[in-house]
Image (tube, helix red, strand yellow):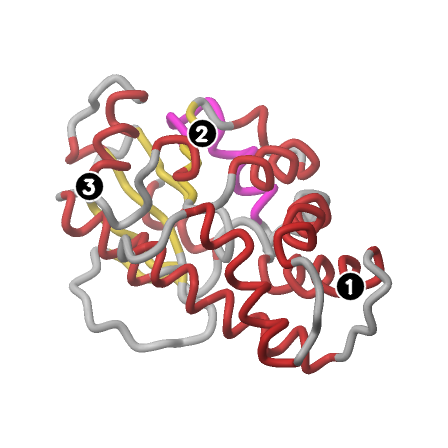
């Protein structure tokens, strides 16, 4: 068993229940703007948003374009004549108030605090992630917080890992483990950077990547690092 000293946690889909947060935020934001919300709007937004984030991870779009472009695409699809930039600004406010956690996440992070250097490394937007981190009660447990929006690079780009390692004091890669749900950002990024990976895979998906560990429940991480 390896002696890990630094644990890098992804945020959305790993610690935060992003599916619930996204659904609540989009419905609430339609109401804020007096727009008629239908469940199909939420379903299509989920697909469109995922597409935009994939493009962002691949460097094909910017954070600024992502913020409003996903809503413009949604409005175009449904023939909604509304200011996508204005809608995007208030959506981020709504999303920043959604701090639902994956079951067991809070207990795990509290338990690991003080035993490991805990880092949160997320491809999210700063004005969303910091409020959620505070509301969740987890902010106090992370020694380092890395938000792609602030440094201009997103997982799996090695630049975000270089920045993270600088902030952590350049530990040995052999002592660092990244835990995340995304194969394309968390796992690919960690693997390519030369650190061990732990894929949080609650839905039993198939990986086409060489992973160090795979778990279906966050509690199983204890068996890997204890």
Q: Quadrant location of the C terminus?
A: top left
Say above or below: 14 vs 137. Answer: below
Looking at the image, is mark 2 or mark 1 nearer the viewer?
Answer: 1
**Magenta stretch: residue 116 in it?**
yes
Image spot of residue 154 (x, y percent): 33, 45
SS class of the residue under badge 2?
strand
Q: Nearer the viewer, residue 206 or 51?
A: 51
Q: Indicate the quadrant where residue 170 lies.
A: top left
In this picture, residue 196 sits left or right of residue 65: left
The segment highlighted magenta reads: 105-119
In this picture, residue 38 sits left or right of residue 22: right
The residue drawn where x is 81% and y is 58% is 33
Q: Quadrant location of the N terminus?
A: top left
Looking at the image, is mark 2 or mark 3 nearer the viewer?
Answer: 3
The residue drawn where x is 53% and y is 51% is 67
**Magenta stretch: residue 127 in it?**
no
Q: Are marks 2 and 1 in contact (CB under 8 Å)?
A: no
Image spot of residue 143 (x, y percent): 45, 22
Earlier sequence position, callout 2 versus callout 3: 2
Looking at the image, is mark 3 or mark 1 nearer the viewer?
Answer: 1
> Which of the labelled discs sits on residue 145, or is there none?
2
In this picture, residue 193 sits left or right of residue 15: left
Residue under circle 3? 158
Q: Are marks 2 and 3 in contact (CB under 8 Å)?
A: no
Say above or below: 138 vs 201. Answer: above
Q: How far is disc 3 from disc 1 in space, using C-alphas?
A: 37 Å
Q: Residue furthest top?
A: 169
Q: Nearer the viewer, residue 158 or 71?
A: 71
SS class of the residue under badge 3?
helix
Residue under circle 1? 30
Q: Indicate the quadrant where residue 30 lies.
A: bottom right
């Amino acid at each position: 068993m390896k002696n890990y000293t630094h644990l890098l946690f992804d945020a959305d889909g790993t610690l935060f229940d992003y599916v619930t947060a996204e659904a609540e935020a989009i419905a609430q934001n339609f109401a804020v703007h007096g727009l008629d919300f239908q469940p199909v709007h939420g379903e299509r937004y989920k697909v469109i948003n995922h597409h935009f984030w994939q493009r962002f991870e691949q460097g094909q779009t910017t954070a600024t374009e992502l913020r409003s472009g996903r809503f413009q695409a949604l409005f175009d699809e449904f023939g909604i004549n509304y200011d996508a930039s204005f809608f995007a600004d208030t959506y981020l406010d709504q999303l920043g108030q959604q701090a639902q956690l994956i079951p067991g996440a809070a207990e795990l992070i509290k338990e690991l605090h003080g035993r490991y250097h805990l880092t949160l490394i997320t491809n999210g937007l700063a004005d969303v992630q910091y409020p959620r981190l505070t509301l969740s009660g987890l902010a106090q447990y992370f020694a380092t917080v890395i938000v792609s929006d602030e440094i201009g690079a997103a997982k799996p780009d090695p630049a975000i890992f270089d920045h993270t390692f600088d902030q952590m004091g350049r530990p040995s890669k052999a002592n660092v483990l990244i835990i995340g749900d995304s194969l394309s950002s968390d796992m690919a990024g960690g693997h390519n950077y030369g650190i061990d990976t732990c894929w949080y895979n609650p839905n039993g998906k198939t990986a086409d990547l060489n992973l160090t560990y795979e778990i279906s429940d966050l509690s199983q991480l204890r068996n890997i690092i204890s």
